[in-house]
């Protein structure tokens, strides 16, 4: 079942008017929230980011925090899968085509859920291929906007090269992936760029940083140069659907040095385990936590 503007229905029955500004202009924002065994993960944080995205596009939040929480729990309960990826989207609504905001229009609210398939152990143990691509997106990458044309083109560059993700570089610095954040390990230090307008503030990124700090793993949040990315001991991508996934080749070259080159490193394995343990503690919490 999906949710559309106050109603529940099978996805096949859901209809959006062609003048929806989400369709015409990509004028909307979204979230992807993983849910494990009926427990939405970091729900408050996802809904806080939704609020920042709405503020970023100057769209009033159509629902209260409590209503959003209820809806996310409801969609998880209405769908059969053990682990789910809840997708929610808010657009500026339906209006005659004009770039400036329409007045008195109700936002469109759409929520769906899909089975969540996180990377299987085989893939994690092997790592994925990535390519570097120039980050040519706009300057508000901190807004989780449905205008994802640039991200789609960037991801397709990876797909064309038979790779899973593109690692984006802007002015000689690492930003993020086309649909993930990127972590670098060099000399046993975990490096990742700070939250600026150039990256999406990932919920998984925050969890990884918290876990590194809580477990005394050396971490530096600072600009990371292209040279550091290319000379990394380890590269990981993080996202709600991919969790912590090692990158084993970059532009066709093995990531890392010596005997471990081209193979996921020990820090990735450690962080993956910490992430799984953390998830398990969340799953033991009450369903409305
Ligand atoms: N994408 N950066 C970008 C550009 C993203 O699209 C995503 C997530 C992330 C990671 O954020 P989080 O850890 O909160 O999932 C970083 C989602 C999963 C998507 O578009 O499907």
Image (spheres, grey):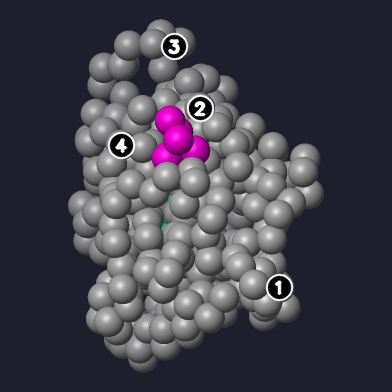
Q: Image quarter for residue 93?
A: top left
Ranked by sequence position, the earlier of labels 1 and 4 is: 1
Report the front residue among 271 and 207: 271
The correct choice, above or below, for 215 with respect to 29 in the image is: below
- Choose between 237 and 48: the one closer to the eye: 237
Q: Mark 3 points at which residue?
A: 96
Q: Quadrant of the C terminus?
A: bottom left
The residue located at (55%, 32%) in the rendering is 134
Seen at 49% across and 38% down, the residue is: 169
> Number of callouts in the render?
4
Which residue is label 1 attached to?
A: 126
SS class, disc 1: helix
Residue at label 2? 136
| Quadrant (top left/top right/bottom left/bottom right) for the N terminus | bottom right
Magenta span main SS? strand
Mark 2–mark 3 Cα distance, whole angstroms, equals 30 Å
Label 1 crowding class (10 Å Cα cut-off): few <14, some 14-19, many 20+? some
Determine whether the beta carbon of the residue marked 1 sits less than 8 angstroms from the nearest atom of ligand 1. no
Q: What stretch is highlighted in magenta?
A: 169-173
């Amino acid at each position: 079942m999906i949710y559309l503007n106050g109603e529940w229905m099978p996805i096949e029955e859901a209809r959006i008017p062609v003048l929806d500004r989400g369709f015409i202009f990509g004028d909307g924002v979204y979230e992807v929230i993983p849910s494990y065994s009926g427990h939405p993960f970091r729900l408050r944080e996802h809904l806080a980011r939704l609020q920042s995205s709405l503020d970023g596009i100057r769209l009033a939040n159509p629902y209260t925090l409590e209503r959003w929480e209820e809806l996310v729990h409801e969609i998880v309960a209405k769908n059969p899968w053990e682990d789910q990826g809840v997708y929610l989207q808010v657009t500026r609504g339906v209006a005659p085509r004009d770039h400036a905001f329409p007045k008195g229009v109700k936002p469109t609210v759409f929520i769906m859920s899909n089975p969540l398939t996180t990377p299987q152990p085989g893939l994690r143990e092997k790592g994925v291929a990535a390519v570097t691509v120039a980050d040519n997106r706009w300057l508000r990458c901190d807004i989780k906007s449905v205008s994802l044309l640039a991200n789609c083109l960037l991801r397709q560059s990876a797909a064309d090269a038979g790779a899973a993700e593109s690692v984006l570089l802007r002015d000689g610095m690492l930003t993020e992936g086309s649909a993930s954040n990127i972590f670098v390990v060099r000399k046993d230090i975990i490096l990742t760029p700070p939250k600026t307008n150039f990256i999406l503030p990932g919920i998984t990124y925050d969890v990884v940083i918290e876990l590194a700090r809580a477990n005394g793993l050396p971490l530096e949040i600072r600009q990371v140069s292209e040279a550091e990315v290319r000379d990394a001991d380890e590269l990981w991508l993080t996202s709600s659907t991919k969790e912590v996934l090692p990158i084993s080749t970059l532009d066709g070259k093995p990531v890392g040095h010596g005997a471990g080159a081209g193979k996921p490193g020990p820090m990735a394995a450690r962080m993956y385990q910490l992430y799984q343990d953390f998830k398990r503690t969340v799953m033991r919490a009450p369903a409305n936590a």
